[in-house]
Image (spheres, rainbow, N blue to C red):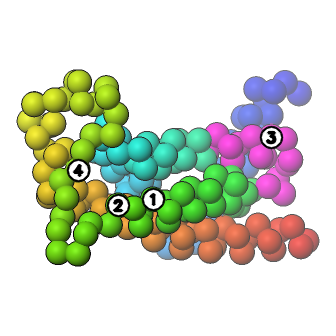
Amino acid sequence: MTFADRIADALAVLGAYSDGLASWVQYWMLFMTVVLNVSLAFVPWRVEARWVLATAFFTPIVAVLFVVLGGKHYVGGFAQVVLWTPLALYLLARRQSLAPPLGAAPAARPDSDAARMLLGRTALGRLARSRAYDAAYRAWLTLVLAIVLVSLGFDWTNVLKRLAG
């Protein structure tokens, strides 16, 4: 069996697993996908958004690799536990540093030189420096963190049950 065949089999296993989940879990996963992809609105300016997007992008790839290398036993949460646990710890640490001073809402600042150069004084650059954008970013980051923590609760439970046999 070639590696490509093993990947195709892993995709079939993961698809069957996903199709067999309860409807509410599938809706939860759809909601997560939408919220995590909102990171695209913040990626040019915020490093945390780039980490969220990278984690969301690599999770299915790592899930396929777990199944290819470890078999069907590794379906259901292993990739999320491996990738999302560090993300949750990182976001928890960063969220504290993003909190505005009491009674203030500081404007966002692009955190990359490329974003500053490309967007500088454009409408998008002004938006990225606005208080409304900063408030939206903090609200989105709080929602992402809540989603990741709730999901990790389910994923750690599934992983520990599978490892226990």
Q: Residue 139 placed where, x, y %?
A: 29, 65
Is residue 75 one of those drawn in magenta?
A: no
Q: Nearer the viewer, mark 2 or mark 3?
A: 2
Residue 68: mark: 3
Q: Quarter holding the N terminus?
A: top right
- Asked whether the beta carbons under mark 1 and mark 3 sit within 8 Å of each other, the answer is no
- Asked whether the beta carbons under mark 2 and mark 1 sit within 8 Å of each other, the answer is yes
Helix, strand or loop at label 2? It is helix
Type of amino acid at the residue the image marks with label 4: Ala
User: Is residue 9 left or right of 101 when viewed as pictured?
Assistant: right
Q: Residue at x 47, y 49 (%)?
A: 52
Helix, strand or loop at label 3? It is helix
Q: Residue 64 placed where, x, y %?
A: 70, 42
Residue 108: mark: 4
How far apart are labels 4 and 1 at the CA level? Answer: 14 Å
Residue corresponding to mark 1: 94
How far apart are labels 2 and 1 at the CA level? Answer: 6 Å
